[in-house]
Amino acid sequence: MSSSQVLNLYFIEARSKLIDVAAFLDRVERAGGDDDFRVRAFREALRALAAEGGGAHRAENVLLAFSDPTGEPVERAGGKAAAGAWRGDAE
Amino acid sequence: MRYIEPHAHMVSRTTDDYQAMVLAGCKAVCEPAFWAGFDRASAEGFRDYFAQLTEHEPARAAKYLLPHYSWLCINPKESENLTLADEVLSIIPEFLGRPNVLGIGEIGLNRNSRNEVAIFEKHVDLAARHNQLILIHTPHLEDKRKGTRIILDVLKNDPRIKPGCVLVDHVEEHTVGMVLGAGFWGGITLYPESKCTPARAIDILESQAGSNLWLNCACDWGHSDPLSVPKTCLEMRRRGHGAESIDRLVFQNPVRFLSQSPHFTLPA
């Protein structure tokens, strides 16, 4: 697809999702949850999103910003559900 | 349009979903063993579940003229109980000869724990000893990249495992390269919130053109959509993909992988 075709197909949807992200961060801030590990990961992901010269790897880099970077298995599963962002070495 | 749904937990769905899938062009559905949403209390509970997957669910699907296949395992979510997992592993061979069983799956990791890795290795050994195809579940969200790496290491360290006989499911942008690069098949799962949207799935497909990939809905008892594959086909058409390339992805590719099992027959 050409650039204009991509924009015609996806711009409004992406714009809507971006505003949802902004509103989500406003909501978290109003609720005083700014220091949560998920918010910290979210802000790192936003930096990856905004980086110039990403070589069209923004989605991959955002996923990496939320990912556990370690390599060894954990001793025990801490519950069945993932949180969406890595808690850090204290997990 | 015709397609195969290679990953759907139909025991959690209504017959209305079977009807809708068939009307949308589904020619066969494959159901991996899954976690029930709660931990089963005994291996006998799994024996009942495997009977459901190999007897009752195929009969339910047949009412809508839909061939139903299954994969067997204990899910990684239940791997922390090593005693129970070993008991379940011991009864799986009783069911491998059933006519709709395609292999061992969906096995893999959930939270990347040592017990999960140990039970995953035992499943891989079981598949190798019985010459079975393998369907892999990769972890969710922040655990996916690390878990996928551990899974690939286990598979690559077992010389009996042929990468072409293993499909690693739920790949995303940060894992698809390592899966395909190691020679394994990859599955892209379409979910409303986690995993991939149709637009992202097509982005991955376009960047990995010609690769051994399939699409699946992985619908279960949670927020999921049994029609996400045909909906993604519509999105592909909106992006200019032709009928042949869509058919290759959602019908020919699953047939190519699944036909490695002697139990799979080409849908009419």
Image: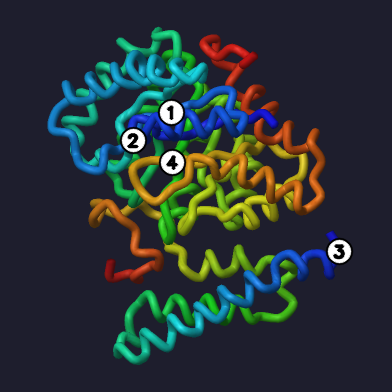
Instruction: Indicate which disc residue B31 carries.
Output: 1
Q: Secondary structure at mark 1?
A: strand
Label 3's element?
loop
* Helix, strand or loop status at disc 2: helix
Q: CA distance from mark 4 to mark 1?
A: 10 Å
| Residue at position x 34%, y 91% in the image | A30
Q: Are marks 2 and 3 in contact (CB under 8 Å)?
A: no
Whether discs 4 and 1 lie on one chain: the answer is yes
Q: Position of residue B189 (x, y in %)?
A: 53, 45
Query: As rendered, which of B123 and B169 lies closer to the eye?
Result: B169
Q: CA distance from mark 3 to mark 1?
A: 39 Å
Q: Kindly indicate whether the residues beneath marks 3 and 4 are on one polypeptide chain.
A: no
Chain on which label 4 sits: B
**What residue would you read off at disc 4?**
B219
Callout 2, which amino acid?
Answer: Ser
Q: In the image, which is nearer the foreground, mark 4 or mark 1?
A: 4
In this view of the protein, which residue sits in the foreground, B119 or B225? B225
Residue at mark 3 to residue at mark 4: CA–CA distance: 33 Å
Residue wearing tag 2:
B12
Mark positioned earlier in the residue sequence (4 or 1): 1
Marks 4 and 2 belong to one chain? yes
